[in-house]
Amino acid sequence: MRRRDFVQRLPVIGSGLFLGASGLTLQACGGIAYLAPTTAPGRLTVPRAALEAEGEAFVQAPGMSRPIYVRRAGPDGVVALLASCTHNGCQPSPVGGRLLCPCHGSEFSLEGRVLQGPAERPLTRYEVTEEAGDVVIWLDRVVGA
């Protein structure tokens, strides 16, 4: 089986959601959590404890067409990437230490860099800060733009 055929057969992470006991976390059948953020103009906020419990998660507020992939990057860092492939807009999913796009096989590092095309541009990466026990994703502050 060709790699692209395999990637195209991977389950879509966004299907099969169910509400977690806390009401803040949704779990996808693929195992990665969806965290429901608190929203404010230009920012999304999730409890740091929820992210630390999962290590990685998708954060999606109502009205967002694609979630943001958020993961702990060492003891003091958090990476937030728009989970929208820069080739055709499909949602890449974390698999084996990278993000794989199920539509055409693009691969991205967990920092958003293109590892393999057809995508030619990195994933959109947002500035992240930590405030009073929360992780804040700044939607109006794109890193490297």
Image (cartoon, rainbow, N blue to C red):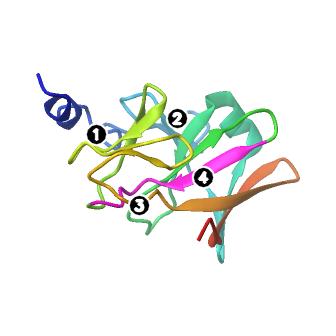
User: Looking at the picture, which amino acid does disc 4 mark?
Assistant: Ala
Q: CA distance from mark 4 to mark 3?
A: 16 Å
Direction right: furthest residue: 132
Which labelled disc corresponds to residue 20? 2
Q: CA distance from mark 4 to mark 2?
A: 22 Å
Question: Tag 3: Cα neighbours inside 10 Å, few (<14), some, or many (≥20)?
Answer: some
Determine if the magenta segment contains residue 84: yes
Residue 12 coordinates in the image, percent (x, y): 28, 39
Which labelled disc corresponds to residue 121? 3
Q: Residues in magenta?
A: 77-87
Q: Secondary structure at mark 4?
A: strand
Query: Is tag 3's residue or tag 2's residue first in the polypeptide sequence?
Result: 2
Q: Residue at x 44, y 66 (%)?
A: 64
Residue 83 coordinates in the image, percent (x, y): 43, 53
Q: Which of 132 and 23 lies nearest the eye of the viewer?
A: 132
Q: Residue at x 50, y 56 (%)?
A: 60
Label 3 vs label 1, nearer the camera = 3
Which labelled disc corresponds to residue 12? 1
Query: Is tag 1's residue or tag 2's residue first in the polypeptide sequence?
Result: 1
Q: Are marks 4 and 2 in contact (CB under 8 Å)?
A: no
Question: Tag 1: Cα neighbours inside 10 Å, few (<14), some, or many (≥20)?
Answer: some
Which residue is denoted by mark 4 in the rendering?
Answer: 80
Label 1 vs label 2, nearer the camera = 1
Q: Which of 21 and 91 lies nearest the eye of the viewer?
A: 91
Label 3 vs label 2, nearer the camera = 3
Q: Secondary structure at mark 1?
A: loop
Label 4 vs label 3, nearer the camera = 3
Determine if the magenta segment contains residue 78: yes
